[in-house]
Amino acid sequence: MNRLSSTLAGLLLLLGSQVQAESVESMLQEMAIIEKNTPLLQAAIEDGVERAQLCFRCHGDDGNSKRDYIPNLASQNAAYLFTQFEHFANGVRKDYVMSKLATALTKEDRINIALYFSQKPVVVREQPVAASSKGEQIYKTTCFVCHGNAGHGSSQYPRIAGQPYEYLTKTLMRFMHNDPDRKNSPMIGVVQNMDEQQLRDVASYIAHMP
Ligand code: HEC
Ligand code: HEC
């Protein structure tokens, strides 16, 4: 290799490592710093609300979804929202619109939009079924371990409380059937030994959690 091409190779290696440094983890760290700093958070939310216009038609202006098959983004933890963009962008998770949108947004957009929706309160919605007490039992023996007693999740687990019943059942069925649109999820193991009725019961309970 001559001198020029070895310099070039070195440069490319350097660039490569910089691209790699923008791993999901480092972007999540960047977002966490913004989230803890009030002026930075306010600025991010102001930028986020503009880009989030793209989402309002389906997810609602305040992140409370307009249709029962669409999830709320309101009060969802920002790290989960951000990670889902990655999943839609790299094909781990598939949805016609979401997969296209996820690749069209810049890193800043994705951070700002996630922070914007995470700060919005969940509005109680009408659910098509009552909360089942069998569902409550399932929640309190299994699901609370990761999603928390109140279903509000954490920086590692999504909030599920108050999601539309239809979205919850559809999603739980997907996990049960190992649907490739939602592959590699830890939830596949969780619902493995449950039947459809149990999934409906627990979904009805979660849908009514405030
Ligand atoms: C045409 C309707 C539509 C638009 C517009 C749309 N979404 Fe979605 N979004 C959906 C649907 C439907 C799902 C559920 C996909 C599935 O079942 O996996 C979803 C899922 C998501 C999820 C995963 C939430 C979860 O609980 O797992 C996130 C995050 C998300 N959308 C963010 C956005 C953002 C941000 C925008 C705007 C940039 C946007 N969406 C625009 C329909 C839409
Ligand atoms: C071992 C930890 C763990 C347990 C226990 C667990 N979950 Fe989850 N759950 C996760 C993780 C992690 C995700 C997010 C990753 C993903 O969606 O694949 C998730 C995602 C979900 C989602 C999709 C959220 C969304 O917005 O799309 C639903 C619904 C859900 N869990 C319901 C349940 C129910 C019901 C139970 C109890 C029967 C349960 N979970 C138990 C870890 C867990």
Image: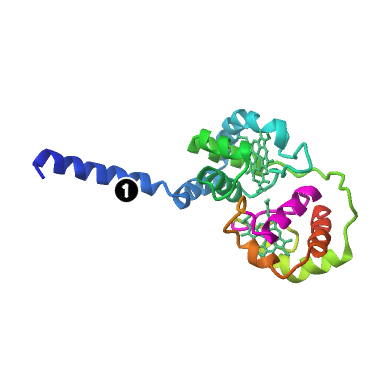
Q: Secondary structure at mark 1?
A: helix
Whether residue 39 is visible to the viewer of this picture, yes or no, is no
**How many numbered discs, if any?**
1
The image quarter containing residue 188 is bottom right
Q: Nearer the viewer, residue 191 or 86?
A: 191
Q: Residue at x 84, y 44 (%)?
A: 125
Q: Nearer the viewer, residue 193 or 4?
A: 193
The image quarter containing residue 95 is top right
Q: Quadrant of ligand 1?
A: top right
Q: Nearer the viewer, residue 187 or 32?
A: 187
Q: Which residues are magenta?
A: 156-179
* Badge 1 density bin: few <14, some 14–19, many ≥20, Cα 10 Å: few
Q: Is residue 165 magenta?
A: yes
Q: Residue at x 71, y 34 (%)?
A: 58
Q: Amino acid at mark 1?
A: Ser
Q: Residue at x 55, y 38 (%)?
A: 102
- Please state if 123 lies on the left or on the right of 108 as rendered: right
Q: Does ligand 2 reach within 8 Å of label 1's beta carbon?
A: no
The image quarter containing residue 174 is bottom right
Residue 32 image position (x, y, % from top left) = 53, 49
Residue 25 image position (x, y, % from top left) = 47, 52
Residue 109 image position (x, y, % from top left) = 53, 35
Question: Label 1 belongs to which residue?
Answer: 17
Whether residue 124 is visible to the viewer of this picture, yes or no, is yes
Q: Is residue 17 magenta?
A: no
Q: Residue furthest right?
A: 130
Would you place residue 149 above or below residue 113 in this image?
below
Q: Residue at x 77, y 36 (%)?
A: 66
